[in-house]
Amino acid sequence: VTDARPIGVFDSGVGGLTVLREILRRTPDESTLYLGDNARAPYGTRPDREVLRFSTEALDALVERDVKAIVVACNTSTAVALSAARRRYDLPILGVIRPGAVTAALTTRNRRVGVIATPATIRSRAYFGAIKDENPAVEVYEHSTPAFVPMVEAGRLAGPDVDAAVAEALAPLLGERDAGGEFVFPLPPSARIDTLLLGCTHYPLLRSAIAAVAGEHIAIVDSATATASALAELLSINGLEAPTELRRQPTHVQLTTGDVAVFRSIAGRMFGDGFADVQPVEVGRTSAAAGGPAIVVAR
Ligand code: DGL
């Protein structure tokens, strides 16, 4: 069996395009329908009840468009709203946290993992719980780095000032360095991590800067890549893979609740290339969203 319908990919804004990019690499025959809630981004600094309501409204809009499965690409939304979404819709829904957590737990050798993410994701302790589920012997050190999302969206991905901002944001986790680049003792216990998990959509774009600060003894893992692999498995288990006939071209559409031109320009700053098919979308017309009746999708 195959299923030609698109995969729905949801994010608070443009950051989830890092997850989309990995999905296109891993499962190139699949069509995708991406929805970015740019009008209300960022989510990572909002209270949980807003993240839950906005996520539900946006996911309703994706489900209405007949997607065969959904990837919640936003870490914040996964942390706060994934369980509610799985109760609400009758289709497979994958978040980014468990795939990333499993990869991190399997990567660490000394059983010490650091996680960086938005304040809302860290507050939820979702990564902590998911890594402990995989291996309770792993020590998990979580740290929020709220400076990164605005920096990435401004197109600041590399350079001396980015390196300095990354070093400053990671200092509480990895230890402080003096002006000469030498570590200032005592180091925090979290400085002994051997694996750092990038628990936010935007952070893979800062990967080189983060890796330079972390040094060669710390492995960097990101949830975007791990999620794309988990999605491939999900599609295969469920008989949902796209047909692979010759000449069949998958389609890729991006919807934004915000301004189309703004979406294009932020995405261009972050990824350097245009996302061709960007269309406006309205979400949340049905005010019943968060508490309303579940939408049942016939298979
Ligand atoms: N997509 C969000 C996440 O992965 C980051 C941007 C935001 O705060 O909305 O947590």
Image (cartoon, grey):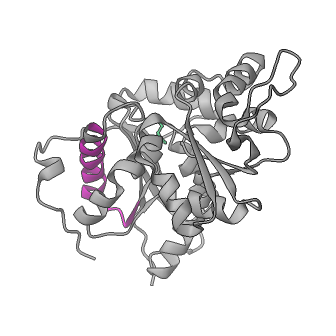
Q: Please state the total of marks drawn on the protein image.
A: 0
* Most foreground residue, 73 or 76: 76
Q: Main secondary structure of the magenta part?
A: helix
Is residue 78 or residue 156 the one in the foreground?
A: 78
The verdict on residue 65 being magenta is yes
Would residue 134 be visible to someone looking at this image?
Answer: yes
Which residue is found at the position 75% from the left and 46% from the top?
192
Q: Position of residue 69 (x, y in %)?
A: 39, 65
Instruction: Report which quarter residue 177 is drawn in.
Output: top right
* Residue 298 drawn above or below residue 53: below
Outermost residue toward the front? 186
Identity of the residue drawn at 41% across and 46% down: 124
State left or right for residue 101 relative to residue 89.
Answer: right
Q: Is 285 a magenta residue?
A: no
Say left or right for 174 vs 297: right
Q: The N terminus appears in which quarter of the rendering?
A: bottom left
- Find residue 295 and report its horizontal and vertical position in percent: 18, 62
Above or below — where is 69 with respect to 209? Answer: below
> Which is nearer the eye, 14 or 166?
166
Q: Position of residue 56 (x, y in %)?
A: 26, 49
Residue 146's x, y, as percent?
52, 28
Does the image show residue 249? no
Give above or below for 8 relative to 210: below
Q: Residue at x 69, y 27 (%)?
A: 166
Left/right of residue 130 with respect to residue 91 in the rendered view = right
Q: Which residues are magenta?
A: 50-70
For the point 25% across and 65% down, the residue is: 87
Quarter location, residue 29 = bottom right
In the rendered image, the residue lying farthest to the bottom is 1
Where, quadrant-wise, is the C terminus in this rendering? bottom left
